[in-house]
Structures are given as structure tokens and as C-alpha cells.
Amino acid sequence: MALEKTVSEAIQYRRSVRVFKNEAIDDEKVKQCLSLATLAPTSSNMQLWEFYHIVDSDKIQQIAKASFDQNAAKSANQLVVVVARKDLWKKRKEANISFLKAQFGNKKESEYSKREKFALNYYQKIIPTIYTDFWGILGRIKYLAFQCIGLFKPIYRQARQSDMRIVAHKSAALAAQNFMISMAAINYDTCPMEGFDSLRVKQIIGLPNSCEINMIIGCGIRDENGIYGERFRVPFEQVYFKL
């Protein structure tokens, strides 16, 4: 898929479009933009995300209703539901281990180099230590233990269940931004939405309760009145600090 804009041009072009034209967009091009979304950086390469590409008009209207009939949802030609899947950490951990072993040549454990052992140890021991929890109890214990250790040396402190949820959502949001910039590069428009009834949307799509919806993205071609105003950003000097 040839991109028509540079990265800088795509970023400048991208706006949250609230009203889309009644004009079809190419399913395959949207799918290719979603494949670019999966190239986004992700914590520990765990890839705790899923993307649901909604093209069925009935489902779009159902999701629009569950999104409080936002114009960006009900006028969208297609929707993308970005889902954070912290609950899949064991499956993703094993996928990383299998990938590493294949990269290392599927040799005996005794033949691994120090660097290779460290990489495998990260997924076999450290990842389970961070992600394993039981009703939040283990997370609190780990949190307190890590704070104590942190008095004497630098240590990773975010080990509670709520912390790992944030990690999964950050990675999902990075992928969503990749998608929206990729869409902008081919003159397709998007609008990320957080206002929706997550339980109803899960039921419409058939998602398990254990997952969490990161955002819903309306997709289409911007209407002439689809952008509600000029872009506003606080002065760059208020958010940029050079040390």
C-alpha cells in the first residue's frame, strides 16, 4: 500500500473527524493500516492488543447507539475497536519464548549464550512475576516489596494489577495512533472515541469480560463540516522542558 503523505504531513492532516461523508472506503486499505498498527512499540513485546474491524452496517449502528449516538460513530463508514488484552499475557509470553528459541536455533539450554539465557529468563521468570496476581492481593504484596527494595537500588515499582492494566492500555493506544496516522497518510479520516457503554459494545462484538476496550475509532472520509473547529493546542513552551 503506497502512502501518499510523509509522516509529518499525515500528522498535520489527521484530525478527529466528527462527521463522515456517506462514501465507502476500501476495507482492504483499512486492514493494511491495521497491520501497520501492529508495528507500534509495545511493552516487553507482549502485544496485548486486538483490533476488531467492523464493516457490517447493522453492527456499526448498534455500536453507535452504545456510543450514545455520537456523530463520529453513527456516520462512520467503518469502525475499529481497539481492545487491550492483559488477560492474554501467558499466551503472548509463550509466543515470545517460542520466537526467541527459534531465533537462537532451537538448541539445548546448555548451549545458550549469556545474552540468550537472559532474554529467555526475562519471559520465563520476570514477566510471570510482574503479571501474576490473585484478586489484587499478590500485586499489593509485590508493590510493597518493590518499594522496600527501591530504598536501596532502582527497581521496577509498577507491579499491581492496576499498573499492568495501564501498561496494556498504553501499548494499545500506541498501536491506535499508528493506525490513525497510517489512515491519514492515504487520505482516510478517523475519530478516536472514549464515550461508550463498554459492556454493550463487548456484547455486540462477542468479547470476553476479561478484556478491556481501549477506544473505538470511527473511519471514513471527512464531511465538509466534519471538523468542528480549528485545532487548539496549549503553547508548546508550556509542555516542553529541556534539561
Image: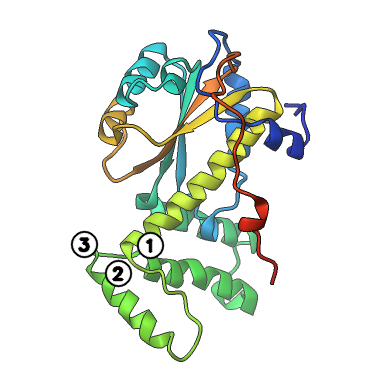
Q: In front of the other: label 1 or label 2?
A: 1
- Which residue matches tag 3? 135
Q: In front of the other: label 3 or label 1?
A: 1
Q: Nearer the viewer, residue 206 or 57?
A: 57
Marks 3 and 1, the one that precedes in the sequence: 3
Q: Residue 128 appears at what percent x and percent y?
A: 39, 67
What is the distance, in whole Å, between disc 3 and disc 1 at their CAs?
Answer: 14 Å
Q: Nearer the viewer, residue 42 or 20?
A: 20
Q: Residue 92 appears at what percent x and percent y?
A: 46, 53
Q: Tell me the quadrant of the picture where the N terminus can be found.
A: top right
Mark 1–mark 2 contact, CB under 8 Å?
yes
Crowding near pointer 3: few (<14 within 10 Å), some, many (20+)? few
* Element type where label 1 sits in the image: helix
What is the distance, in whole Å, between disc 2 and disc 3 at their CAs?
Answer: 8 Å
Position of 5 with respect to 39 (left or right) is right
Note whether 101 is above or below 185 in the view shown. Answer: below
Q: Residue shown at 51%/18% (left/top)?
A: 19
Q: Which mark is residue 139?
A: 2
Q: Tell me the quadrant of the picture where the C terminus can be found.
A: bottom right
- Which residue matches tag 1? 163
Which image quarter: residue 107?
A: bottom right
Q: Residue shown at 39%/68% (left/top)?
A: 130
Q: Nearer the viewer, residue 130 or 213?
A: 213
Which image quarter: residue 167?
A: bottom left
Question: Label 3 amino acid?
Answer: Trp
Specify whether residue 171 is in view.
yes
Marks 1 and 2, the one that precedes in the sequence: 2
Question: Label 2 amino acid?
Answer: Gly
Q: Residue shown at 36%/86% (left/top)?
A: 148
